[in-house]
Image (cartoon, rainbow, N blue to C red):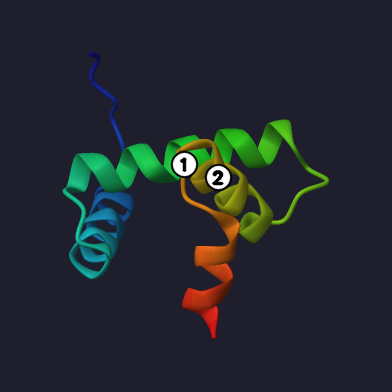
């Protein structure tokens, strides 16, 4: 594990987002980093498509996702 230096404003935004999402500050930062990396590697996919793909890979059935959106 390494140390990443970020500015105070970004850290504050991570802290606020983590309280909404129920993640720790580190988990929220990790989520944003992972999604950002996946977006750069897959520019043809939308954020939603990337999240659905990751959830599917984790074993969440797409039908359950569609039901949750209704």
Q: Is residue 31 left or right of residue 56?
A: left
Tell me the residue at 32%/42% (across/down): 29
Secondary element at image label 2: helix
Q: In this view, does 14 lie above or below 30?
A: below
Residue bearing mark 2: 56
Q: Is residue 3 above or below residue 47?
A: above
Number of residues whose C-alpha sits closer than 10 Å to that of mark 1, classed few (under 14), some (14–19) or many (20 or more): few
Q: Where is residue 26 in the image (x, y as percent from the top left)?
A: 21, 39
Choose top left, top right, bottom left or bottom right for residue 27: top left
- The tag on residue 67 is none
Task: Please identify the quadrant where the N terminus is shown.
Answer: top left
Q: How many labels does the image show?
A: 2
Where does the image place residue 9, in percent across and percent down from the top left? 30, 56
Q: Distance between the residues labelled 2 and 1?
A: 5 Å
For the residue pair 64 and 2, the one nearer the viewer reads as 64
Residue 27 to residue 19: above or below = above
Which residue is at 72% across, 56% downward?
A: 46
Looking at the picture, does residue 27 appear above or below residue 10? Answer: above
Q: Mark 2 touching mark 1, by CB under 8 A? A: yes
Quarter assignment of residue 38 = top right
Q: Is mark 1 on a helix, strand or loop?
A: loop
The 10 Å Cα crowd at callout 2, few under 14, some 14 to 19, many 20 or more, is few
- Percent x, y of residue 5: 28, 29
Q: In this view, does 27 lie to the left or right of 56?
A: left
- Residue pictured at 59% horizontal, 58% vertical: 62
Residue placed furthest toward the top: 1
Q: Which of 65 and 32 is in front in this view?
A: 65
């Amino acid at each position: 594990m390494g140390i990443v230096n970020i500015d105070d404003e970004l850290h504050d935004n991570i802290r606020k987002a983590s309280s909404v999402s129920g993640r720790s500050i580190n988990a929220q930062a990790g989520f944003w980093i992972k999604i950002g990396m996946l977006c750069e590697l897959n520019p043809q996919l939308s954020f939603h498509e990337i999240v659905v793909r990751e959830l599917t890979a984790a074993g969440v059935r797409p039908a359950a996702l569609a039901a949750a959106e209704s």
